[in-house]
Image (cartoon, helix red, strand yellow):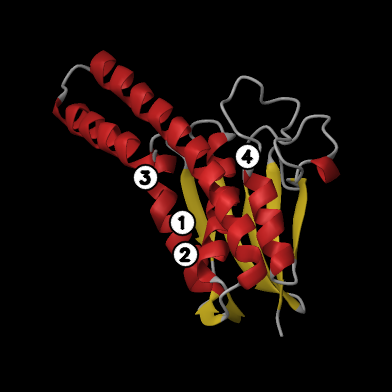
Amino acid sequence: MRTPLATVRAQAEIIHRRLNKPEHRTTIREMIRAIDESSRSAGQLLDHAMVTFRADSLEHTPLDLVELLGETCARLAPTAELKDIAIKTNLPDAAFDFIGDSVLLQGALRNILDNAIKYSPEDSEITVSAARNGNYVLSIRDQGRGFGDADIQDLTSRFSRGSNVSDIVGSGLGLTIADEVARSHGGRLEISENTEGPGACVSLVLPQS
């Protein structure tokens, strides 16, 4: 599912770079974004299947959560750039040493950040941070729509989405995946409105010891 979509996207990017007329570039850019939406939905279905498969037999390998978060931001930066969204990181220099399944943890972070990009307006910012408060707290804060009047506690249920995003393609699995990964590592997912303005804040909270 992912390979043909990636191939079409690559060809569209080549065409985008070669076009000179702004209206043509805009059309191709919209096409690339539509391909990305399809890729996201396919990827989330595969991610959820992987979480279900691996949750009972997690890999326990040493990793650095700060490094994992930075890598996730770098991977999704091109997607954010298509909407002129700036990903701003506030990450410590010190490592956040953790024992866990790096594949699942990166999948959780990718889905949280991908949601932030998807539901954020153009020319906005996403702030990514990492802190310690007895736990490791990896937070992604956006300036998007927030959750409307949806019950935040229900948003981790499969296929559940906010009441204000019906016009945006989505599978309703992103937060479900992140929640299941967090719980499988003895942690939790914290979801709230952005206290610093419009938007949402989603944090992956993992035990420090």
Q: Nearer the viewer, residue 77 or 37?
A: 37
Residue 182: horizontal and vertical position, in percent? 69, 63
Mark 4 or mark 3, which is nearer the start of the sequence? 3
- Residue under circle 3? 78
Per the image, the residue denoted by label 2 is 70
Q: Which dot, 4 or 2, sits closer to the camera? A: 2
**Which residue is at 66% across, 26% downward?**
165
Q: Which mark is residue 143?
A: 4
Residue highlighted by disc 1: 73
User: Is residue 28 left or right of 98 when viewed as pictured?
Assistant: left
The span from disc 3 to disc 4 (Cα, nearest Å) is: 18 Å
Residue depth check, mark 4 versus mark 1: number of the one nearer the observer: 1
Q: Residue at x 78, y 30 (%)?
A: 148
Would residue 87 appear left or right of 171 to someone viewing this image?
A: left
Neighbours of disc 4 within 10 Å: few (<14), some (14-19), many (20+): many
* Marks 1 and 2, how far apart at CA: 5 Å
Residue drawn at 75 percent across, 35 percent down: 147
Q: Are marks 1 and 2 in contact (CB under 8 Å)?
A: yes
> Is 140 above or below relative to 67?
above
Asked whether disc 4 touches disc 1, contact meaning CB atoms under 8 Å apart, the reply is no
